[in-house]
Amino acid sequence: MHNKINIQGLYVLSGLIFILFSLSFLSVRMEKKLTHVLKIEKKHLQAKLEISNAQELINRNRQEIDELNSEVNHLAEQINTLIFNANEINDTIVRFMNESLANQETLDSLELMEDAIAQNEHLIDSLSFVFENKSDNLLSLMNKFNKNEFESKLKQNNSLALQKELWWSKIIVFIYLSFSILGLMLGGFMLIRGLISKTKPEDHAV
């Protein structure tokens, strides 16, 4: 009889311990971990937003680079065309001078050609100045693009790390929740069994 009472008390005590453990320690740990999960999830969403913004910036930079590169190439073609025309005019002047056509018509033609060369040189200088500025801007945009792309990759790596941490944290929360539920069920079962076993002798005695 004494052993039976001890077993009943052990059931009741064990049940209470399991219930208190599930409601106190596991619940507190689960609450802390759940708070941590929410913080990580917030950081992860913020990181995804930063990645999206960085990608938009990269796309804008790429578009600016393409447009500016097209302008630079067009300027280079214009400069090459002007240089080619100037060379042709120079060749014509040299040919005229070699032929010694020292008449007024030839002199007038030479003056016109010299004016054309002067205009070409002026255009070449102007276009070269614009070309240099745009080339510098293009180089600056490309450096900016590379920097933004590097930062975007860092943010993506950070997002992946947060995603992994979030995944493992959710698993730990699930484990805590499972143990908590299991502890409550086991504690409730042992408590009920101990109380039922305790009341049975009294009912039999009556």
Image (cartoon, rainbow, N blue to C red):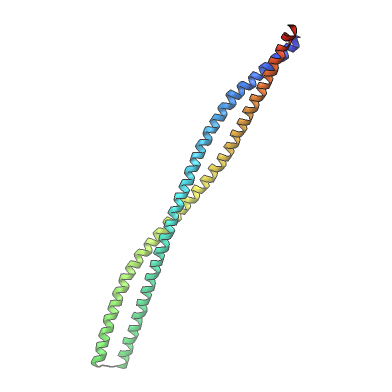
Q: Residue at x 37, y 79 (%)?
A: 84
Residue plotted at (49% across, 48% down): 154
Residue 197 picture quarter:
top right
Of residues 127 and 205, the one nearer the viewer is 205
Q: Nearer the viewer, residue 58 or 45?
A: 45
- Rendering coords of residue 38 (x, y %): 51, 36
Q: Is residue 193 left or right of residue 151?
A: right
Residue 10 seen by the camera: no
Residue 142 in the image: state x and y as whole percent: 43, 59
Residue located farthest toward the left when viewing the structure as drawn: 104
Residue 167 to residue 191: above or below: below
Residue 49, relative to residue 28: is it above or below?
below
Name the quadrant of the N terminus. top right
Image quadrant occupied by the C terminus? top right
Residue ID at (53%, 42%): 162
Find the residue positioned furthest to the top. Answer: 206
Q: Is residue 196 above or below residue 118?
A: above
Look at 67% across and 24% down and name the residue there: 186
Q: How many marks?
A: 0
Q: Residue 118, can we see it?
A: yes
Residue 156 percent coordinates (x, y): 51, 48
Is 127 in front, or is 42?
A: 42
Give coordinates of residue 172: x percent, y percent: 60, 34
